[in-house]
Amino acid sequence: MAATPILVIGNYPADQQQSMIRFAHLLVRFYQPQAHVHLVLPPSIVTRLPGLPALLCKYLAYIDKLILFPLWLIIVSRFYRLVHIADHSNAFYSFFVPRRRCIITCHDLLAVRGAMGDPIVACEASPVGIWLQRMIMAGLRNANAVAFDSEASHHDYLRLVGCPKGQRHKVIPIPLNAPFTANPASFHLSAVEQQQLPAAPYLLMVGSALPRKNRILGLQLLLVLSAVTAYKLVFAGAPPSPEEQKFISQHHLYKSVLTVERPSHALLNHLYCGAHALLFPSHAEGFGWPLLEAQACDCPVIASNTTSIPEVAGSAALYADPFDVAAFATHVRALEEPNRRADLIRQGRVNLRRFGHEVISRAYTSFTLHTA
């Protein structure tokens, strides 16, 4: 495979899907020791016209993504032995590359489930969104092979699609996409970032404010814990949603809820290291990178027992139903016991071994050899 040319297709840069940008670069690193790899992103062409309002750019971007870039793929992809579409949201591109050379990584089918009316995932879709999800499913069916981040996503696929004749599947988890460490001194913080570090004790929630992330449970948890201790809650990522802001206002939690919007990698590492625990009460996930990030920083994990979460965090987390605030509170108090805390941290270090870069790189290249 030394001279095998591989084309990795990433995401449209203007969409700013940071996790998928990082995953595309991970694939390049997986393949580089054994192949010549070319990473390509759908270029912004129409949306570069001057003076376009933001809303118009959002819709004109579909010309770039769904018309111009596919035409380019038809011409160029035939020169590659393998075409790897890094994100299933671009599965439509499988129709414009040689099918037998096409592999797609499917990270989750939560948006598809939402478009089909599944209330659990809390992903409502517009008429355009429903059409796009149908395109994604058609593109996934068309690929020669599909890799899944988790058994949970694979199960969703088999339930919703089945297994198209001749299509190959493999569940391959994803490793950490950046270096996280239990020694925060490894990362320098600016003076402004140092001022953003909260005083202990605090509980940390990392990510977006999507309803399925269930951040409202963290706010409810503060009310339960306030009678016994003075925990704060830190949102790292998106600021409170209108619903969350309303809850904060009604219960006078202004001093107990802190937001660190879009923290740098260094600041996020420090937040993990200082937290009493990572709260991860999602209703549904395709994988869950924060689970591994926290474990790499010796931050205990308290998470919901749904979808891929137990599969990723393994025995190194405390679990509860995502509606059971009392159970989450019990776990928070349990981690105040030093031996229980130390044991969970130790298990987290062991769990991380399953997600080593070399292990997953070998899994991908092995799957690729049988696909290309």
Image (tube, rainbow, N blue to C red):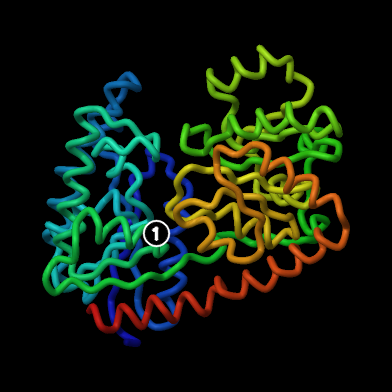
Q: Quadrant of residue 354?
A: bottom right
Dot 1 falls on a residue whose secondary structure is helix
Task: Find residue 322 and report its horizontal and vertical position in percent.
Answer: 55, 42
Q: Is residue 61 left or right of residue 352?
A: left
Q: Is residue 80 left or right of residue 41?
A: left
Q: Quadrant of residue 140?
A: bottom left
Q: Residue at x 61, y 33 (%)?
A: 217
Image quadrant holding the N terminus, namely: bottom left
- Spot the residue most to the top: 250
Q: Nearer the viewer, residue 316 or 321?
A: 321
Q: Residue at x 72, y 45 (%)?
A: 267
Q: Is residue 328 above or below residue 346?
A: above
Q: Nearer the viewer, residue 270 or 83?
A: 270
Q: How many marks?
A: 1
Residue indicated by mark 1: 152
Q: Residue at x 80, y 45 (%)?
A: 333
Q: Is residue 249 above or below residue 34?
A: above
Task: Find residue 164 and report its horizontal and vertical position in percent.
Answer: 14, 66
Mark 1: few/some/many CA within 10 Å (<14, 14-19, 20+) = many
- Spot the residue most to the bottom: 2
Q: Is residue 332 left or right of residue 50?
A: right
Task: Find residue 29 and report its horizontal and vertical position in percent.
Answer: 46, 71
Q: Residue at x 24, y 34 (%)?
A: 129
Q: Quadrant of residue 79?
A: bottom left
Q: Nearer the viewer, residue 242 or 343?
A: 343
Q: Is residue 206 above or below residue 80?
A: above
Q: Amino acid at mark 1?
A: Ala
Task: Find residue 356 and report its horizontal and vertical position in percent.
Answer: 57, 74
Image quadrant holding the C terminus, namely: bottom left
